[in-house]
Amino acid sequence: MQLKSILIIIFTLALIGCTAEQSIPEAKALDNIIDTAFEDLPEPQLSPPAKEPTVISINGAFIPETVLITAGEEVTWQSNDDKSHKISCYNLRKRVVQSEIMKTGDSFTHKFDLRGEQLCVDAIFGHRGTIIVEQAVVNGITGNVIGATGNPPPIGVTILLLGMLVAFSQIAIFYRK
């Protein structure tokens, strides 16, 4: 019998909280602000705009030997000596990419999406280099949008939360007996 009255109190407080909140003009104004806050914002970019590929010259060695890029960027190897080359790149000992045999003046381009260090090797002459791939920066909306005005919550929400606290404490006392 006592549990039934507690549930009726919870339901009544929830109903009061919902109807009281809608009658407060500040709550409606805040809803309008939230509804229109995102209308003029551009879509977030998940990766930076495409850039010119990073070029590694092959002339007796990889020049430069170590390259730092962002995930999604391209790296181009350019054969600038009179020898043949074949590029293989590995991430955690697993081959990620392998080029065809490159002659003088040939190039090979690969887009790196996997984060971490990629070991790149000239399979014919053993030249080694490292591609360090960093996480792409995500441009998005951050921060506390709801409640950013600094106003306290509407009175209906406060009443609802207090009522639920009282009801749950009564239930705990009831079941402890």
Image (tube, grey):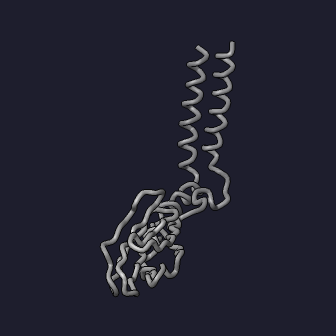
Observer-nearest of 84 and 164: 84
Residue 174 located left or right of residue 97: right
Q: Which residue is rendered at x = 53% and y = 67% of the image?
A: 134
- Residue 21 picture location, percent across and down: 57, 47
Observer-nearest of 144 and 122: 122
Residue 37 located left or right of residue 143: left
- Residue 72 picture location, percent across and down: 43, 69
Q: Which quadrant of the figure contains the C terminus?
A: top right
Rendered position, 90 above or below 106: above
Rendered position, 14 above or below 5: below
Q: Which quadrant of the figure contains the N terminus?
A: top right
Q: Which residue is rendered at x = 39% and y = 67% of the image?
A: 88
Name the quadrant containing residue 54. Answer: bottom left
Q: Which residue is rendered at x = 58% and y = 52% of the image?
A: 24
Rendered position, 141 above or below 20: below
Residue 166 located left or right of residue 128: right
